[in-house]
Image: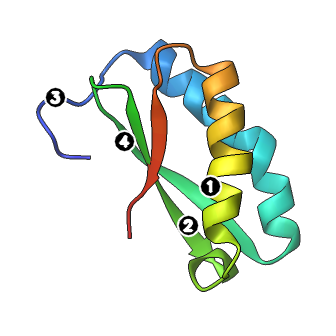
Amino acid sequence: MTDPAAVTDPSVIERVEQALSVCRPYLQADGGDVELVGVGNDGVVEVRFLGTCVTCPMSRLTLRAGLERVILEKAPGVRRVEERR
């Protein structure tokens, strides 16, 4: 995220990365993955799907019911998670 309002607090970024590492094995088991694009000061996390997740019709559900749920639980202050293509 190249937004000047991007979060630079390492603890927030670290918590989001930890949350993603919880989800990552499930995505990788199906040939996919996810990477953190950035965290904005507005509490919006941007992620990018990789591998088979890019074309998977269930990726929207994975984003909301999987990634977002875990990130919101592990990283207080995050409001939502969005996909960046």
Residue nearer the viewer, 82 or 14: 82
The residue shown at (80%, 66%) is 28
Apparent side of residue 83 relative to residue 33 in the rendered image (left or right) = left
Disc 2 on helix, strand or loop? strand
Q: Identify the mark at residue 49; answer none if there is no mark.
A: 2
Q: Is residue 48 above or below residue 65?
A: below
Q: CA distance from mark 3 to mark 4?
A: 10 Å
The residue shown at (73%, 41%) is 21
Q: Identify the mark at residue 63; answer none if there is no mark.
A: 1
Query: Dividing the picture into quarters, in which one does residue 25 lie?
Result: bottom right
Query: Dividing the picture into quarters, in which one does residue 15 lie?
Result: top right
Q: CA distance from mark 1 to mark 2?
A: 9 Å
Q: Amino acid at mark 4?
A: Gly
Q: Residues within 10 Å of mark 2 (few under 14, many from 20)?
A: many
Q: Residues within 10 Å of mark 3 (few under 14, many from 20)?
A: few
Q: How is the model colour-coded?
A: rainbow
Q: Residues within 10 Å of mark 1 (few under 14, many from 20)?
A: some
> N-terminal of the two: label 3 or label 4?
3
Disc 4 on helix, strand or loop? strand
Q: Amino acid at mark 2?
A: Phe
The residue shown at (15%, 40%) is 3
Q: Residues within 10 Å of mark 4 (few under 14, many from 20)?
A: many
Q: Which residue is mark 4?
A: 38
Q: CA distance from mark 2 to mark 4?
A: 13 Å
Q: Which residue is mark 3?
A: 5
Disc 1 on helix, strand or loop? helix
> N-terminal of the two: label 1 or label 3?
3
User: Contact, CB < 8 Å: mark 1 with mark 2?
Assistant: yes
Q: Amino acid at mark 1?
A: Leu
Apparent side of residue 38 relative to residue 14 in the rendered image (left or right) = left
